[in-house]
Image (tube, rainbow, N blue to C red):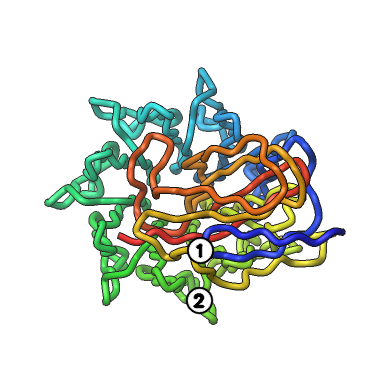
Amino acid sequence: MKRKSLFLGCVILLSRGSVPAHGDSGAIVAWGHNDYGQCCVPEPNRDFTAVAGGGYHSLGLKADGSITAWGANDYGQGDAPRPNAGYVAIVAGGEHNLALKTDGTVVAWGNNALGQCNVPEPNTGFTKIAAGWNHSLGLRIDGSIAAWGDNPFGQCDVPTPNADFTAIAAGTFHSLGLKTDGSVVAWGINDYGECNVPEPNTGFVAITASAEHSLGLKLDGSIAAWGVNDFGECDVPAPNTAFIAIAAGHWHSLGLKADGSIVSWGYDDDGQCRVPEPNAGFTAVGGGCLHSLALRPLGDPIAGIVDGSQHARDIGPTAVPNPSRGQLRICYELPGATAVTIEIFDASGSLVRRLPGGWQTAGNHAADWDGRGDADLRLPSGVYVARIRTTAGAGTGKMVLTP
């Protein structure tokens, strides 16, 4: 197939192949424990932009802002909320779910025996969400965290000062918050050291939490892991570098590499660490209790799958700043006149910004991104992916926002 060069932000990528004219966002790949059908993605398995794994159920967010849910449904957690539209982010807890709307409100459904679905008022101004087994977290536009639900170990008691947070994560009985200075704050149960953030507590850009362990992604692409390690879930495989996203199951961990491959380690009795082949082209990753999920664009040439065998490659930065404090120029080349869609995704695979595109002529083009989301809010530091979609192909490039 024809090869073309695509320049994204500070990253030059080689693009091969083509995608259908309808511009599919992606398909979900699921593996591991499947007794409740949590790995049986409903058809049509396409147009997904984000994934989330719960106890024994799964969620997928579609490009049109709707949610698909499947797997265990004894508390209604496998039912999509109504009206099913206008969502920009999803998370799954043990038996409940949270979804963030474009207007900054949070919708919660599923098991509510401990108040984990009772979003505190005012239900507005949220920018991030996280779900533990029976508790929930929401990050507000002012950098404070709201927490509700089960609280026997203080997992809902956000430490003071409750300010300057940019990201959140919830485990079974503990919680994490990422500060603007790149440090991590942890609270709740600490029986296995899941709240003991390793030194140096700096340079973090993303966090995730599970039953009794925690993960943090560093600016240099390495992963720090702490907490219980009975199954090696904190033993990050070498080389511990080039990671761009992280996820955690109950006793297993996952990391997405810059080349689109997934590394998984820890408890594997249900195959949750056996990434299906071809292990390439993934753009997002998620962990359920005993299963794993990933997103891979259908036929997306830059994502790393070409005729089922060839892999795209990231050949490093160009002159545009990367990392950046919030001013990036995304440069790309079009082989012919075409309609262009420009999208920005965060490390979880959630769509956070659409930039002006439209009909463009052949040649070199550029789009400026100010580090803000669709709600014109400054996005937290971390890894982001820019994607250019046309009727003939697509390409993605990694970008890093720093505090």
Q: In the figure, is residue 298 to the left or right of 243?
A: right
Circle 2 residue = 241
The kind of secondary structure element at disc 2 is: loop
Q: Kindly identify the residue that appears in the image at 51 percent across and 42 percent down.
A: 351
Q: Quadrant of residue 189?
A: bottom left
Total labels drawn? 2
Element marked by disc 1: strand
Viewer-proximal residue among 384 and 216: 384
The answer to whether residue 172 is above or below residue 235 is: above
| Residue for badge 1 | 244
Q: Alpha-carbon distance for marks 1 and 2? A: 9 Å
Q: Amino acid at mark 2?
A: Thr
> Is residue 290 at all visible to an observer of this figure?
no
Residue 111 spot, x, y in % from top left: 42, 31
Residue at 56% in and 51% down: 366
Vertical side of 374 occupied by 196: above or below: below
Which residue is the extreme one toward the left? 160
Q: Quadrant of residue 285?
A: bottom right
Q: Is residue 51 above or below residue 82?
A: below
Residue drawn at x 51%, y 27% as measured from the top left: 76
